[in-house]
Image (spheres, rainbow, N blue to C red):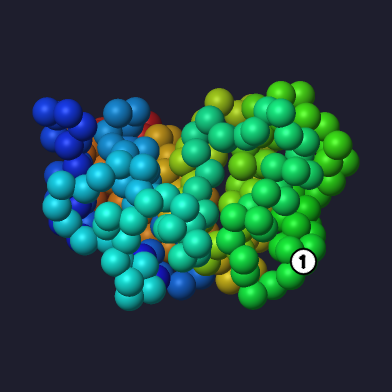
Amino acid sequence: MLAVEGLNVFIEASHILRDVTLEVGDRELVCLVGRNGAGKTTTLRTIMGFLAARSGRIEFNGGGLVGLRPHMIARRGLGFAPEDGGVFGDLTVAENIEIATWTRPGERPAAERVERAYEVFPVLRGYAARGGTQLSGGERKMLSIARALALDAELLLLDEPFEGLSPAIIPMISESIGAITRLGHSILLAESNIHHVPEYASQLYVIERGEIVFAGKPSEVLQNPDVLRIIGGAA
């Protein structure tokens, strides 16, 4: 599915990512955990082509992504839900979801892809005619992920989907993310809070100062006090 190897990224003179290596397999939920500023968003944005890699390899289903523009990467089957949601405020909820079907022709009909997005996030069906600016923070997060799902993406990149949400909303979105993997999609999820990592995650990477400092099962990181201190997860 996705293989990132030796990724180095500079922003102006600052070396942001240092030899980042990670993998996401079929139907996997993989989490990239790190403190704010550790390099999580930069990693996702580089995979999607918004930032240029100085060196390294990014392959998706055997094809290279380095040097491709974001719309070309999306057409290859990667969907991106940014931390701020990226919701189009002058479009309705329905239009925000439907626009993904125009961006990437998929094997499934557009109507089926839209319906799948509503099935995973049923609360959005009742808000279909509501404008993007009329949504709460949690609703914008749901809409952003629903739009990536309607793209018919094989792999979804989710940047901080639980950030800033009330404790009551987090389980709802976590269950929806689980439903997406059960539908056969893979997910790479960036998260700053180790306690928000879904229990069904198959692999976890910890990033600190642009470097991967841990790779393993989520249960293993909870037994590693040195890594927990880095990400602030110690009791």
**Would residue 148 be seen by someone viewing this image from the given angle?**
yes
Q: Name the foreground residue: 111 vs 169.
A: 111
Q: Name the foreground residue: 166 vs 218.
A: 166
Spot occupied by residue 178 in the image (x, y as percentages of width and height): 61, 58
**Would residue 234 be seen by someone viewing this image from the given angle?**
no
Q: Quadrant of residue 110?
A: bottom right
At x 21%, y 48%, the residue is: 53
Judged left or right of residue 111, residue 183 is left
In the structure shown, which secondary structural element does the residue marked by tag 1 occupy? Answer: helix
At x 61%, y 47%, the residue is: 145
Q: Which quadrant, please, contains the C terminus?
A: top left
Q: Is residue 1 above or below residue 214?
A: below
At x 47%, y 53%, the residue is: 71
Q: Quadrant of residue 45?
A: top left
At x 67%, y 49%, the residue is: 99
Spot occupied by residue 165 in the image (x, y as percentages of width and height): 60, 29
Q: Which quadrant, please, contains the N terminus?
A: bottom left
Q: Name the foreground residue: 129 vs 23.
A: 129
Q: Name the foreground residue: 88 vs 80.
A: 88
The amino acid sitting under disc 1 is Glu
Residue where numbered disc 1 is placed: 112
Spot occupied by residue 63 in the image (x, y as percentages of width and height): 33, 71
Judged left or right of residue 171, residue 156 is left
Spot occupied by residue 105 in the image (x, y as percentages of width and height): 62, 66
Judged left or right of residue 181, residue 46 is left
